[in-house]
Amino acid sequence: MCLCMCISLVAGEGFCTKKLESAGSIYNQIKKDMDQEEVMSLVAVLAFMVKVDEEIHISEKETFRIICNRFDLKSVDLNQILVNPLSLRHLLQDIHTQDAKTLLVNLLALISAKDGIICHSEEHSLLKIMEILGESISDYPFFDQQGMLNIDKVLNYEMQFLAKLPPIDPI
């Protein structure tokens, strides 16, 4: 992905299906507990997912932009991600907390589903990332009985979670 494209992506709403009743508090806690390196790694993994199918859909781009805004990332931060590309495995090693892992899996599922099509490369990448993180599909309700990502469930949980998030600029 070119530098201009990534900078134009600047994004951030999050979504977490585990423990939906406390989703907003999970998000606030994650934002407090995550260090800059963990945030940058999380966003770099999300950027990977945006482009994994070799097509950047406008809805994926907008979701990514919202996420970056929520984490208060600037163009300089996104430049740093692009200038210092690291392996996916290395980036995932920087995701330490369980809440950050959960948030990452949820956001990856959301980005995968946003264009209305979950392609093989997106689903395969998500499952591989979950394996590296030590996450189980049984902990995420948007997987069906066969272990496949269910687009309708992902998008249904997105709305529930987004409704619980605090506004970007509270009044």
Image (spheres, rainbow, N blue to C red):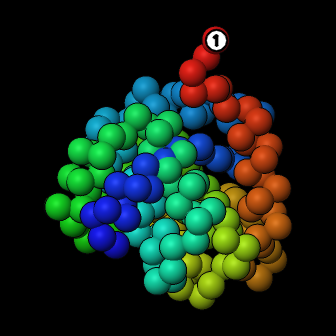
As rendered, which of 19 and 59 lies closer to the eye? 59
Q: Give x and y (percent) for residue 12.
A: 53, 44
In percent of width and height, residue 10 lies at: 43, 49
Residue at the image position 29 percent from the left and 38 percent from the top: 36
The foreground one among 86 and 134 is 86
**Image-based side of 26 in relation to 39, left or right:** right
Looking at the image, residue 137 lies above or below residue 79: below
Residue 122 figure quarter:
bottom right
Residue at the image position 53 percent from the left and 61 percent from the top: 61
Q: Residue furthest top?
A: 171
Instruction: Give the vertical position of 100 relative to 54 (above or below).
Output: above
Query: At 77% across and 82% down in the image, what residue appears?
Result: 146
Left or right relative to 84: residue 63: right
What kind of residue is marked 1? Ile
Q: Is residue 33 left or right of residue 15?
A: left
Q: Residues within 10 Å of mark 1 (few under 14, many from 20)?
A: few
Q: On the image, numbered disc 1 is attached to which residue?
A: 171
- Res 164 seen here: yes
Tell me, yes or no, if residue 125 can be seen here.
Answer: no
Count of numbered circles on the image: 1
Provide residue 79's location: percent of width, then percent of height.
Answer: 23, 54
Q: Quadrant of residue 138?
A: bottom right
Image quadrant for the N terminus?
bottom left
Query: Helix, strand or loop at disc 1?
Result: loop
Farthest left residue?
Answer: 84
